[in-house]
Image: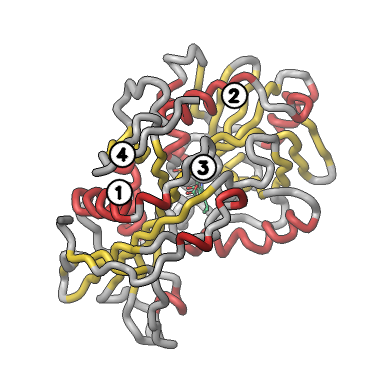
């Protein structure tokens, strides 16, 4: 028996899944974990079927966006167990985001227990192919119904899961990215460091225009000088210049502290890569490219893992990086991080939370 009160779904959505065309975020597993906050405390939480929820027109989150979310993944390992990658980092970041928009914190141990229970119950939704995984989406929102602008006094936390393939249709192939020159996503002191809906709303118009022009995503510059690189809409960004890996520092105050970003920086030493966090201007990117010193550009994120950037466009100028091919540094990181996640190479940093299933399914080693 699990530790949470559980109501099982009467019907399963499993048979509707097209496993060869999962895409990203198109399917949901049968159950969610849900917990409610009222009278100053979170309840014990329970597992229940994934199904529509009634919502009042006066729900404060619909009006004022008091909501935060997370994104992490579970992988089916070759030994039949399940690896969840660095979930305690997501628990911590959820609470960081919570503080920024006045949402009460959630107990990080209960969060990890809830993840485990939910994954065990819906373990058949964890895909079997290399490159696929179970994306886990925790969400917290104000559930009060009122029209004044103030923090809610009731909240709902939901954890849902979704079997996914790559985030970009291109997979590990390089993506084309448009550098924003008309819009900004976040400014220092704003919401950029929190994983809250407003940042994504701020990105939609520029993202839509970029897609219409044939680009996958937008690379944001700092909101004040519009000069320094911040990040991409759903990824942090890394450059390899003269053999050195460079990424913007979190101290810029408008960037999400990516967990993949942190993993890349932590792994640098053992992979023999020199890495530094420093501000980098868009002019420097284009200048080093002109001088032949810009070797690679790639994004890092849970959904996208490592995503090479083949083309950057800014103010009428387009550059092609590394012949639009995946470079050796990006490839090394992709192989190492996914190798750890799928349990194929040693997890020296103890990053995986291992979940043992009652009836493990041993996969053929590839
Ligand atoms: N930046 C933004 C805006 C994101 O939405 C994400 C995705 O979560 C990232 C960066 C990468 O963060 P992580 O590596 O923790 O997924
Ligand atoms: C993630 O990588 O988890 C993201 O949040 C990306 C995006 C779906 C918002």
Residue identifier under label 2: 331
Asked if the residues shown at circle 3 and circle 1 are in contact, with their CB atoms under 8 angstroms apart, the answer is no
Please state which of residues 353 and 274 is positioned toward the viewer in this rendering: 353
Q: Mark 2 vs mark 3: which is more N-terminal?
A: 3
The image shows residue 331, relative to residue 127, as above or below, that is above
Please state which of residues 359 and 154 is positioned toward the viewer in this rendering: 359
Residue 125 placement (x, y as % from top left): 42, 52
Q: CA distance from mark 1 to mark 2?
A: 28 Å
Asked if the residues shown at circle 2 and circle 3 are in contact, with their CB atoms under 8 angstroms apart, the answer is no
User: For residue 307, which quarter of the picture?
Assistant: top right
Q: Disc 1 or disc 2, which is closer to the eye? A: 2
Q: CA distance from mark 2 to mark 3?
A: 18 Å
Q: Mark 1 vs mark 4: which is more N-terminal?
A: 1
Residue 236 can be seen in this image:
yes
User: For residue 219, which quarter of the picture?
Assistant: top right
Q: Disc 3 or disc 1, which is closer to the eye? A: 3
Q: Disc 4 or disc 3, which is closer to the eye? A: 4
Identify the residue shown where x is 72% and y is 56%.
Answer: 182
Q: Mark 2 vs mark 4: which is more N-terminal?
A: 2
Residue 96 can be seen in this image:
no
Q: Mark 3 vs mark 1: which is more N-terminal?
A: 1
Residue 169 placement (x, y as % from top left): 67, 47
Residue identifier under label 3: 132
Q: CA distance from mark 3 to mark 1?
A: 23 Å
Residue identifier under label 4: 360
Q: Disc 2 or disc 3, which is closer to the eye? A: 3
Asked whether, in this view, residue 149 is left or right of residue 326, the answer is: left
Say which element carries label 4. Answer: loop
Q: Residues within 10 Å of mark 2 (few under 14, many from 20)?
A: some
Identify the residue shown where x is 66% and y is 23%.
Answer: 327
Residue 190 placement (x, y as % from top left): 47, 57
Residue identifier under label 1: 91
């Amino acid at each position: 028996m699990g530790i949470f009160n559980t109501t099982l779904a009467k019907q399963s959505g499993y048979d509707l899944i097209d496993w060869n065309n999962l895409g990203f975020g198109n399917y949901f597993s049968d159950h969610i974990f849900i917990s409610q906050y009222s009278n100053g405390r979170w309840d014990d939480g329970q597992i229940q079927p994934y199904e529509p929820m009634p919502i009042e027109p006066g729900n404060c989150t619909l009006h004022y966006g008091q909501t935060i979310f997370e994104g992490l993944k579970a992988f089916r390992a070759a030994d039949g167990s399940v690896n969840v990658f660095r979930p305690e980092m997501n628990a911590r970041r959820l609470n960081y985001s919570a503080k920024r928009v006045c949402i009460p914190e959630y107990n990080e141990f209960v969060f990890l227990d809830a993840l485990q229970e939910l994954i065990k119950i819906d373990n058949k939704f964890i895909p079997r192919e290399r490159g696929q995984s179970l994306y886990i989406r925790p969400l917290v929102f104000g559930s009060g119904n009122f029209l004044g602008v103030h923090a809610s006094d009731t909240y709902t936390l939901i954890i849902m899961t979704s079997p996914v393939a790559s985030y970009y249709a291109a997979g590990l192939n390089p993506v084309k990215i448009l550098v924003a020159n008309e819009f900004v996503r976040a400014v220092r002191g704003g919401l950029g460091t929190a994983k809250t809906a407003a940042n994504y709303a701020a990105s939609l118009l520029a993202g839509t225009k970029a897609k219409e022009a044939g680009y996958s995503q937008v690379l944001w510059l700092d909101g004040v000088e519009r000069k320094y690189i911040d990040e991409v809409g759903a990824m942090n960004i890394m450059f390899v210049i003269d053999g050195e890996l460079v990424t913007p520092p979190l101290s810029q105050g408008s960037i999400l502290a990516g967990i993949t970003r942190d993993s890349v920086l932590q792994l640098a030493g053992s992979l023999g890569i020199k890495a530094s966090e420093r501000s980098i201007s868009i002019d420097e990117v284009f200048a080093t490219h002109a001088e032949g010193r810009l070797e690679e550009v790639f994004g890092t994120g849970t959904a996208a893992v490592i995503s090479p950037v083949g083309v950057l466009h800014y103010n009428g100028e387009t550059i092609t990086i590394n012949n639009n091919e995946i470079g050796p540094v990006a490839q090394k990181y992709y192989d190492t991080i996914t190798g750890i996640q799928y349990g194929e190479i040693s997890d020296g940093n103890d990053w995986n939370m291992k979940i043992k299933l009652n009836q493990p399914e041993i996969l053929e080693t590839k």
